[in-house]
Image (cartoon, rainbow, N blue to C red):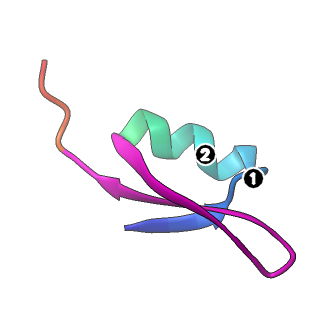
Amino acid sequence: MLCTQSANDRTMRPAARLGFTEMERFEDYGAEQWFGVWSPITP
């Protein structure tokens, strides 16, 4: 699982490359948060 601010490009780009997929977006700490889970990448 991974949770970060959706505006945090330095976390979002590697998360996408590593195979994390979005499960939910929500508001917390005064900003939009992104919640994703890892799924194995199949060729």
Query: What secondary structure is the stretch in magenta mostly built from?
Result: strand
Residue located at (53% from left, 42% from top): 14
Looking at the image, which residue sits at the far right? 30
- Look at the image and give the residue range highlighted in magenta: 19-39
Q: Is residue 32 above or below residue 11?
A: below
Would you identify the image quadrant in which residue 9 lies?
A: top right
Assess disc 2: are there few (<14), some (14-19) or many (≥20) residues with their C-alpha within 10 Å of its C-alpha: some
Residue located at (33% from left, 40% from top): 19
Tell whether label 1 touches label 2 (CB within 8 Å): yes
Tell me which amino acid carries mark 2.
Answer: Met
Residue 8's disc is: 1
Residue 39 place in picture, x, y as percent? 22, 47
Q: Is residue 30 above or below residue 10?
A: below
Residue 41's disc is: none
Q: Is residue 40 above or below residue 34?
A: above
> At numbered mark 1, what does the secondary structure look like: helix, strand or loop?
loop
Tell me if 10 is positioned left or right of 1 in this view. right
Give the labeled residue for mark 2: 12
> At numbered mark 2, what does the secondary structure look like: helix, strand or loop?
helix
